[in-house]
Amino acid sequence: MENIKQNKMAEKPVGKLMLSMGIPMIISMVLQAVYNIVDSIFVSNMTEGGENALNALTLAFPLQILMVAVGIGTGVGANVLVAKSLGMKDSERANKAAGNAVFLAFVIYAAFLIFGIAGAGPYIRSQTSNHEIAQMGTNYLQICCVFSFGMTFFAVYEKLLQSTGHSVCSTIAQVSGAVTNIILDPIMIYGWLGMPEMGVKGAAYATVIGQIVSFAAALAFHLKVNILISNKPCYFKPDKNIIKAIYSIGLPAIISQALISVMTYGLNLIFGSISEAMVTAYGLYYKIQQFLLFAAFGMRDAIMPITAFAYGMGERKRIRDCVKFGQLYTAIIMFAGFILIEILSVPFSDLFGLSGETQELFISAMNISSVCFVFAGINIAFQGIFQAMDGGIQSLVISFCRQIIFVFPAAIIFTGITRSNHDLSWISWMTFPIAELLASVIGLFLFLGIWHKNIVEK
């Protein structure tokens, strides 16, 4: 069985291999975005306080992204380390990488549990002076943090399944949780089927129950089909060298995802200087945008283990094919997403029950900001390629460029123009295409450098 799996990663044409592994990963990643978008749809249609509830979820969103970032980043580090170790036929190192990733999941959950109890309230209140919004946001975030073990452990076991080519299993686990969340949302938010009407708290409980279901399914699959990885207790013992190796790969992925949290928090403050409607419009746009970004992240997660395996084997032609097909497939995903967003901007605004200024701002955000997808795909593919080829720093540079360095100055300039003339509010959304375009130029130069250093000179 091990030889069959090794042959699949070593010999199957890269284009077909990337599709066979990438499609389930794309579905899995897109479904992660379901949790936030489904909650937003249902709370926005509450009979009372729907728009305030929507704003509350927008304020909680950056911290949720941070939780996902740390969990997925740790899983990504284990994913690449396991795949690379198996490519080098080093089963012992692969087992230690998997065991230490599970140990780290315990540590991560403990940290977010403490934050949920002590820090959720101050965090939400730092973004709003509206008491109702602050209370809703605090309630929602506390529940998501205190019960975050489902999300944390699922992130690790999902990546372990993907590292050995069992991406279909990880997708089934993700689907099971997403479906659970969708079913429970109206029941717990609106009080259907005899349940008490819990509002925003119901949305949070539906989310964490869905995450726990995904974790349970992923663990069951891991124990049944991941025969390339041993689950002996000795491998769960912390090993500083293995942990260092996991985070040398995973830390850039964590920071990359965490920067989304920093960016959304900062933009909430910047856009909030214009109006609460602009914050709500941006929050909704970004949650919809997540479907497409997470689809690209799914392809990136296929690029990483395939490229890492080829890199571990020293197969230059397969590495070149990984770059070619990775960029091609990601570009196709993002271009299709751009067309889809342009077509569905008005129907989405109706789905959330938007009206007036919020609706106008949301539609303009969808139409203008979505131009960034074309360039974002290039950057996301480069990040996966860099991480697989020992280019964690390069991946980190791209993340900082596209989410911090180019975003905040542009946002400050454009919102300044908007405050002077509200008829030009649409110009604020130009922040995102400009940031992604400039980052893609940087990414190309970084790729040429890492290719020369790690491939040509070796």
Image (tube, rainbow, N blue to C red):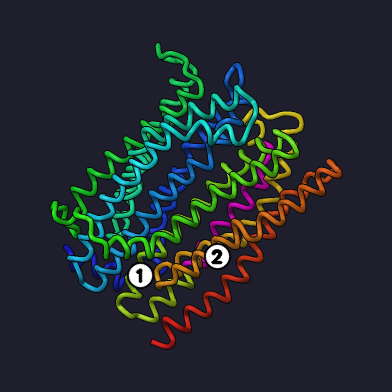
Magenta stretch prevailing secondary structure: helix
Examine the rendered structure and indicate whether residue 369 appears above or below residue 64.
below
Q: CA distance from mark 1 to mark 2?
A: 19 Å
Which residue is at the front of the view, 252 or 192? Answer: 252
Residue 159 picture quarter = bottom left
Examine the rendered structure and indicate whether residue 266 appears above or below residue 1.
above
| Disc 1 target residue | 308
The amino acid sitting under disc 1 is Ala
* Residue at (30% x, 41% y) in the render: 215
Residue 172, x across and y down, in percent:
33, 44
Residues in magenta, as a range: 326-347
* Residue at (50% x, 24% y) in the render: 200
Residue 227, x across and y down, in percent:
17, 56
Comparing marks 1 and 2, which lies closer to the viewer?
Answer: 2
Q: Is residue 129 magenta?
A: no
Seen in the image, is 32 located left or right of residue 243?
right
| Disc 2 target residue | 398
Question: Which class describes the residues within 10 Å of circle 1: few (<14), some (14-19), or many (20+)?
Answer: many
